[in-house]
């Protein structure tokens, strides 16, 4: 088996004891193959009743705890997890499947399909088929948005991001889609200027990784139309994509 980065995943049998270092993959594999997770990160909040040992954060997992769990597979992501942690796990004989940071909904679903059908030896789950169907079409653009994912400093979605493609498919363009960076760090004045110049007419504020709220975020853009969205619906690839489409589509109605 070969992961998304071209590395060999030396599994000798379907994965039965898996540690997931990626919240959205945790949900995807537990929904698709219940009971095979041996551990997950502190940020793996779904399924809400998931009861497995925790191994710290995604960026800085406790690798010793992962090794103690003796998994037959670890799931990681090229954007969320550090190469040095992946290499240490592999050096200790643990197979690691690294999913590439997907820039589009179809590529994310294709990656998950490979994990589930190859590493888990599963049939294609119903939720994946449904997600592919509901995200197949792209709605006409009705808004052009600035999408912060952090403040202090301000960081926004730029080019080739999964969240940007999710919004594009429900009719919300990204004002920074043509930026050289995937996660630009413009000054607040530059962000405000986008609205003043009518280059953007919607502010999309997710609740993760930074938890924007009605009182934390909109006040920096007093004249801009804003919406608060679930970060899980915006940036998670997995079963949440099925419900995410209807939730996000309502923003453009």
Image (cartoon, rainbow, N blue to C red):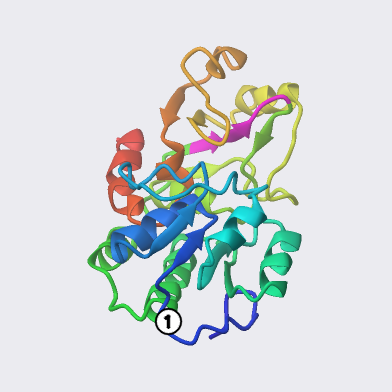
**Vertical arrangement, residue 26 with respect to residue 93, above or below:** above
Residue 136: percent from left, percent from top: 34, 63
Between 55 and 153, the one lying in front of the other is: 55
Q: Residue at point 59% right, 44% down?
A: 56
Residue 99: percent from left, percent from top: 56, 67
**Vertical arrangement, residue 74 with respect to residue 219, above or below:** below
Q: Per the image, is 218 magenta?
A: no
The reply, left or right, for residue 143 in relation to residue 147 is left
- Whether residue 215 is visible to the viewer of this picture, yes or no, is yes
Q: The C terminus is located in which quarter?
A: top left
Q: Main secondary structure of the magenta part?
A: strand
Q: Which residue is mark 1?
A: 118
Q: Residue at point 36% right, 81% down?
A: 121
Instruction: Give, as a single range, the part of the protein colored magenta.
Output: 144-152
Quadrant in the rendering for residue 63: bottom right
Q: Which secondary structure lies at badge 1?
A: helix
């Amino acid at each position: 088996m070969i992961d998304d980065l071209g590395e060999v995943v030396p599994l000798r049998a379907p994965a039965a004891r898996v540690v997931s270092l990626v919240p959205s993959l945790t949900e995807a594999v537990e929904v698709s193959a219940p009971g095979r997770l041996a551990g997950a990160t502190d940020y793996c909040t779904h399924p809400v009743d998931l009861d497995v040992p925790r191994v710290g954060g995604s960026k800085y997992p406790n690798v010793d705890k992962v090794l103690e769990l003796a998994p037959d597979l670890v799931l990681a992501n090229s954007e969320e997890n550090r190469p040095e942690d992946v290499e240490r796990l592999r050096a200790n004989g643990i197979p690691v499947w690294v999913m590439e940071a997907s820039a589009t909904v179809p590529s994310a679903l294709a990656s998950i399909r490979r994990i589930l059908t190859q590493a888990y030896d599963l049939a294609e789950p119903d939720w994946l088929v449904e997600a592919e169907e509901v995200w197949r079409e792209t709605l006409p653009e009705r808004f052009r948005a600035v999408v912060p994912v952090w403040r202090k400093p301000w960081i926004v979605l730029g080019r080739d991001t999964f969240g940007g493609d999710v919004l594009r498919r429900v009719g919300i363009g990204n004002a920074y889609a043509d930026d050289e960076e995937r996660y630009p760090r413009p000054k607040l004045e530059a962000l405000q200027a986008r609205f003043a110049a009518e280059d953007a007419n919607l502010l999309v504020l997710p609740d993760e990784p930074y938890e924007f709220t009605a009182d934390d975020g909109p006040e920096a853009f007093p004249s801009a139309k804003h919406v608060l969205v679930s970060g899980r619906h915006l940036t998670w690839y997995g079963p949440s994509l099925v419900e995410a489409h209807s939730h996000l589509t309502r923003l453009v109605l």
